[in-house]
Amino acid sequence: MRKAVIVSCLFATVQSTAQLIDRTTAPNPINEGIAKSLQQEIGAGRGDLYTPNSSAFVIQRDPFRAIRRGRQIFQRKFQHLDGAESTFYARDGSGSIVDNGAIGAGLADSCSTCHGRPRGSAGFGGDVVTKPDSRDAPHLFGLGLKEMLADEITAELRDRRSHAIAEAVAQNTPVTRPMTAKGIEYGTVTAKPDGTVETSNVQGVD
């Protein structure tokens, strides 16, 4: 009976944290937060099965580790140095959390604070202390497929641009080609014999 009570108490103390600090910039006595820096978590980007520390490499090697890393990136409190422009409190998330508790609180600096139902997950809905349902941000499930589609479109458009440049250089005359990918039209580009490209007629993309 005593063992059961102890086990119950241990499990009762486990909580799902919506936002996690970066332990490399905000060390603390209980080692709360993410052990890796953002650059360490990002690693070598998407990569492939043969690129160490890339997403594809980690997923192939240890799927559970990949899920945990993705979840922690989702829960990370982002800073100015990470490109988060709105984080201006709590010394930008760096320092002693013992002396300044705001480092672990303050603004909603992580993805999970808006997309946090159920609490702390990569779901949808709110995680606002004063009114938990006051935010209703859209869910993020399936966005990876949209990102892959955008990558494929980008690759196709760049390929068309490269072919136009090669043709213009070979023929020593300007070449105009349509920029179309996945059935979507993005205007035209005009490649010049000197290898430059006129993009004033491109529409919908930079």
Image (cartoon, rainbow, N blue to C red):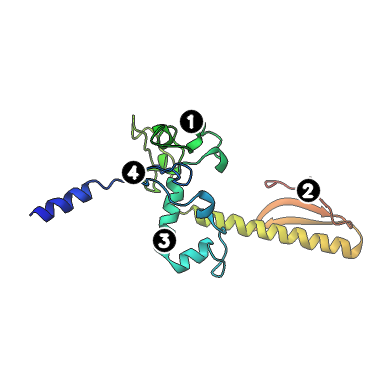
Camera-nearest label, 3 or 4: 3
- Res 19 quadrant in image: top left
Q: In the rendered image, is residue 183 in sight?
A: no
Q: Amino acid at mark 1?
A: Tyr
Question: 20 above or below 58?
Answer: above
Residue matched to label 2: 199
Q: Amino acid at mark 2?
A: Thr
Camera-nearest label, 4 or 2: 4
Determine whether the residue tagged by mark 1 lies in a helix, strand or loop. loop
The numbered mark, 3 or 4, whose residue comes first in the sequence reads: 3
Marks 3 and 1, Cα distance to the nearest angstrom?
31 Å
Determine whether the residue tagged by mark 4 lies in a helix, strand or loop. loop
Residue matched to label 1: 89
User: Can you give x and y, in whole percent of width and height, for residue 36 in the image?
Assistant: 47, 52
Residue matched to label 3: 65
Camera-nearest label, 1 or 2: 1
The numbered mark, 4 or 2, whose residue comes first in the sequence reads: 4
Q: Nearer the viewer, residue 114 or 74?
A: 74
Q: Residue furthest left?
A: 1
Where the N terminus falls, by quadrant? bottom left
Marks 1 and 2, Cα distance to the nearest angstrom?
42 Å
Question: 184 above or below 170?
Answer: above
Q: In the rendered image, is residue 73 in sight?
A: yes
Q: Amino acid at mark 3?
A: Arg
User: Can you give x and y, in whole percent of width and height, for residue 114 in the image?
Assistant: 42, 39
Q: Amino acid at mark 4?
A: Arg
Q: Is residue 130 left or right of residue 63?
A: left
Determine whether the residue tagged by mark 3 lies in a helix, strand or loop. helix
Q: Which mark is residue 119?
A: 4
The crowd level at tag 1 (other Cα within 10 Å; few <14, some 14-19, many 20+) is few
Marks 3 and 4, Cα distance to the nearest angstrom?
21 Å
The crowd level at tag 2 (other Cα within 10 Å; few <14, some 14-19, many 20+) is few
